């Protein structure tokens, strides 16, 4: 398991086969957690396994979804990562995060969002980063706005439905963090 990103309270690491049941039980199989994710419904255990094996980072890649853990704990509290995204017609990366219900309301989403922005701009030298948010997901929209991203477009994404596209470019982000 490789470390992708460390923040003051969080560790983002690559996934391993033994993480799959926990990710399903805490995230992908929970209707309330999945309400605004993908097409808006929980996944079966088999669908979760297929999705994780297809979209998660098992190796040393810096893009893709990874396991989110609270530092000092072996408990999985979510998934996050920078994902390839072409919704604006360019080779962009989308920052994403999904938190298990027990991790809601503790500031973890903002912390991992800020960490991903720093990683995307400093380590990956990206010129801009995107976030795609379901229009009804007020909590995620607030987090995305707090970390300095601005709404640029509404669209419908295949297999995900309606989304609001948010963006921040490197210079705006650098001016915000100093």
Image: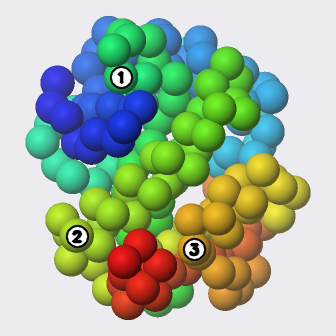
Q: CA distance from mark 3 to mark 1?
A: 25 Å
Tell me, yes or no, if residue 16 can be seen here: yes
Q: Residue at x 58, y 44 (%)?
A: 109
Could you say whether the residue bearing mark 1 is in a helix, strand or loop? loop
- Left or right: where 70 falls relative to 131: left
Q: Are marks 3 and 1 in contact (CB under 8 Å)?
A: no
Q: CA distance from mark 2 to mark 3?
A: 16 Å
Q: Residue at x 51, y 29 (%)?
A: 78
**Residue named by callout 1:** 71
Tell me, yes or no, if residue 39 can be seen here: no
**Residue named by callout 3:** 148
Which residue occupies the foreground of this view, 112 or 57? 112
| Quarter of the picture holding the C terminus | bottom left
- Left or right: where 46 falls relative to 106: left
Q: CA distance from mark 2 to mark 1?
A: 22 Å
Q: Which x, y percent locates residue 160? A: 68, 56
Q: Are marks 2 and 1 in contact (CB under 8 Å)?
A: no
**Residue named by callout 2:** 122
Could you say whether the residue bearing mark 2 is in a helix, strand or loop? helix
Q: Which x, y percent locates residue 116? A: 38, 56
State which tag comes first along the sequence, 2 or 1: 1
Above/below status of 76 relative to 66? above
Q: Residue at x 50, y 73 (%)?
A: 130
- Mark 2 surroundings: few (<14), some (14-19) or many (≥20) residues within 10 A: few
State which tag comes first along the sequence, 3 or 1: 1
Q: Which x, y percent locates residue 132? A: 62, 65
Q: How many marks?
A: 3
- Mark 1 surroundings: few (<14), some (14-19) or many (≥20) residues within 10 A: some
């Amino acid at each position: 398991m490789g470390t992708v990103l460390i923040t003051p309270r969080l560790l983002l690491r690559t996934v391993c086969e033994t993480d799959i049941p926990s990710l399903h039980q805490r995230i992908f199989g929970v209707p309330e957690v999945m309400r605004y994710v993908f097409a808006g419904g929980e996944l079966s255990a088999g669908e979760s396994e297929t999705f994780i094996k297809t979209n998660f980072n098992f190796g040393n890649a810096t893009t893709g979804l990874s396991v989110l853990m609270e530092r000092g704990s072996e408990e999985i509290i979510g998934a996050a990562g920078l994902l390839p995204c072409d919704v604006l017609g360019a080779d962009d990366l989308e920052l994403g995060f999904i938190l298990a219900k027990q991790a809601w309301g503790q500031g973890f989403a903002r912390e991992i969002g800020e960490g991903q922005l720093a990683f995307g701009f400093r380590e990956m030298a990206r010129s801009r980063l995107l976030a795609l948010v379901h229009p009804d997901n007020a909590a995620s929209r607030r987090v995305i706005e707090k970390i300095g991203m601005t709404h640029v477009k509404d669209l419908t994404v295949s297999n995900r439905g309606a989304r609001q596209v948010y963006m921040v470019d490197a210079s705006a982000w650098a001016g915000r963090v100093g």
